[in-house]
Image (cartoon, rainbow, N blue to C red):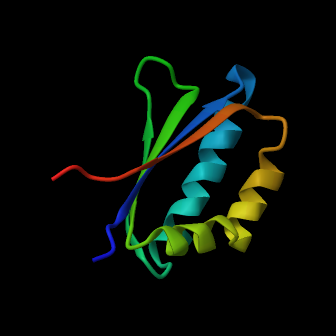
Amino acid sequence: MMKSLTIIARIEANKDRIDLVKSELIKLIEPTRKEQGCLQYDLHQDNENPENFIFYENWETRELWQTHMENDHLKAYIKATEGAVSNFVVHEMSKMD
């Protein structure tokens, strides 16, 4: 049986661009949640370091997540936040039962 994939995506905005990055990240939520294979797609912002954001995602398969990574709304986000993100790290995780 294929295991689902958990993604932890860490995005760090430049301190002077937090509002821009936040608004662009929020735009990703609705279209992504409608994508095939998306089980969970939740955005979090650090309470003490507001430049730090985390997407907590669950996908049916890695292949469907990879399809998500090629979607137009993600490409639009990357273009809109060019130069505004200082760090972006993706962790592909598997749940331990």
Task: Provide residue 51's location: percent of width, then percent of height.
Answer: 58, 26
In which quadrant of the rendered view does residue 83 lie? top right
Q: Position of residue 32 (x, y in %)?
A: 52, 69
Task: Give the image quarter of residue 15.
Answer: top right
Which residue appears at 50% of the width and 19% of the height? Answer: 49
Give the residue furthest to the top.
Answer: 48
Q: Is residue 43 left or right of residue 90?
A: left
The residue lying toward the viewer, choosing from 34 and 8, is 8
Q: Nearer the viewer, residue 1 or 77?
A: 1
At a point 76% along the width and 52% down the height, the residue shown is: 78
Relative horizontal placement of residue 48, taking residue 22 as reference (left or right): left
For residue 34, above or below residue 84: below
Query: Does residue 62 lie above or below 84 as drawn?
Result: below
Q: What is the total number of numbered labels drawn onto the structure image?
A: 0
Q: Quadrant of the N terminus?
A: bottom left
Q: Residue furthest left?
A: 97
Q: Looking at the image, which residue is at 47% across and 78% down?
A: 34
53 is higher (above) or lower (below) than 55: above
On the image, the x and y values in percent for residue 37 come to 43, 77
- Residue lying farthest front? 1
Relative side of 87 to 54, left or right: right
Q: Residue at x 64, y 64 (%)?
A: 69
